[in-house]
Amino acid sequence: MAIFSKTCEYAIRAVLYIAHKSALDKRVGIKDIAAGIDSPELYLAKILQDLSRKGIISSAKGPNGGFYIENNALSKPISDIVEAVDGNALFYGCALGLKQCSEIHPCPLHDQFKAIRDQIKDLLYTTTIGAFNQELLAGMLSLKK
């Protein structure tokens, strides 16, 4: 079971893949990224274009072009990727998707879900792209299912 949309899963994995390659002074194309994270190319192209527009990754055209990540972007939290793709509903929304759910008018799952949601929020706001990248470089993580 996933907590992210499929688009968000691909976005996170793609950013981490790009960060990994950038650490090796490489720029990568969509074909390589798609193969590296088991993603459909055309779908991924739209995701990467959006992430580039939002400043999470960078791209360069030409024979030495491709996607890469700037060093300063490595300090961005994973939550930036989630919010760029899915918005902030994961961090503030109702487990049942109810608009009127709140502290004053809680749904049946409100209190339990709020505790879980806050843990996820804390994890994604405090874990940086660079921290994940260090684990990738050390061979501790994989980006394929």
Image: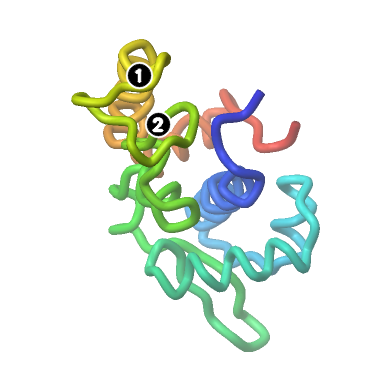
For the C terminus, the image quarter is top right
- Secondary element type, mark 2: loop
Res. 72 image quadrant = bottom left
**Residue at the (33%, 37%) spot, across then down:** 100
**Residue at the (51%, 61%) spot, across then down:** 25
Q: Relative to residue 25, is residue 99 depicted above or below? A: above
Q: Relative to residue 28, is residue 138 depicted above or below? A: above
Mark 2–mark 1 Cα distance, whole angstroms, equals 7 Å
- Secondary element type, mark 1: helix
Specify whether 48 is left or right of 123: right
- Report the residue marked by disc 1: 110
**Residue at the (66%, 45%) spot, across then down:** 6
Image coordinates of residue 124 in percent, x first then y, are 36, 34
Q: Relative to residue 84, is residue 143 depicted above or below? A: above
Image coordinates of residue 71 in percent, x first then y, are 34, 58
The residue carrying pointer 1 sits among few (fewer than 14), some (14 to 19) or many (20 or more) residues within 10 Å by Cα, namely some
